[in-house]
Image (tube, helix red, strand yellow):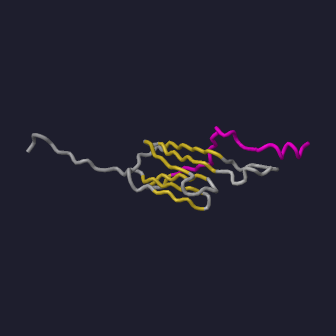
């Protein structure tokens, strides 16, 4: 009976469920860096959006062996989403993202302070 349960059941989240991958956020002197652990993806399996100070990484990791009768299943498949609020003001350009060895590393330059020139009106 034990073997029958494993051979009939798939250990995965329901189709509608969305899982959150492990995510690290840190800052350097000039950038905010977000690292998301999402192994096993190809180009087009994920999307990165920046809305205000919210960084959103979403996508789907497809199960390559849907028809197998798992004995143990701990790797999450299906749709994923992680949202990170960044407390720093960011530059509008210069962002980069690199996917390597199962980690997506996103670097966002922090906005630098700028001097605003003051012009006195009426004094000469």
- Picture coordinates of residue 60, whole percent (x, y): 60, 48
Please indicate whether residue 46 sits to the left or right of residue 74 in the image.
left
Q: How many marks?
A: 0
Residue situated in front as seen by the camera: 5 or 108: 5
- Picture coordinates of residue 37, whole percent (x, y): 61, 53
At 70% from the left edge and 41% from the top edge, which residue is drawn? 13
Residue 47, magenta (yes or no): no
Q: Residue furthest toward the front? A: 67
Q: Name the quarter where the C terminus is drawn.
A: top left
At 41% from the left edge and 48% from the top edge, which residue is drawn? 90
Q: Name the quarter where the N terminus is drawn.
A: top right
Please indicate whether residue 66 sits to the left or right of residue 60 in the image.
right
Residue situated in front as seen by the camera: 11 or 101: 11
Question: Where does the magenta region start and end?
Answer: 1-26
Residue 79 in which image quadrant: top right
At 65% from the left edge and 51% from the top edge, which residue is drawn? 62
Residue 22, magenta (yes or no): yes
At 69% from the left edge and 54% from the top edge, which residue is drawn? 64
Q: Residue furthest toward the bottom? A: 101
């Amino acid at each position: 009976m034990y073997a029958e349960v494993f051979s009939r059941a798939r250990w995965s989240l329901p189709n509608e469920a969305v899982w959150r991958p492990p995510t690290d956020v840190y800052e350097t002197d000039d950038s905010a860096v977000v690292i998301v652990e999402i192994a096993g993806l190809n180009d087009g399996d994920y999307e990165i959006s920046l809305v205000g100070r919210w960084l959103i990484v979403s996508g789907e990791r497809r199960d390559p062996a849907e028809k197998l009768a798992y004995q143990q299943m701990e790797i999450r498949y299906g749709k994923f989403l992680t949202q990170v609020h960044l407390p720093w003001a960011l530059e509008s350009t210069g962002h980069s993202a690199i996917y390597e060895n199962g980690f997506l590393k996103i670097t966002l330059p922090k906005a630098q302070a700028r001097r605003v020139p003051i012009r006195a009106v009426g004094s000469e």
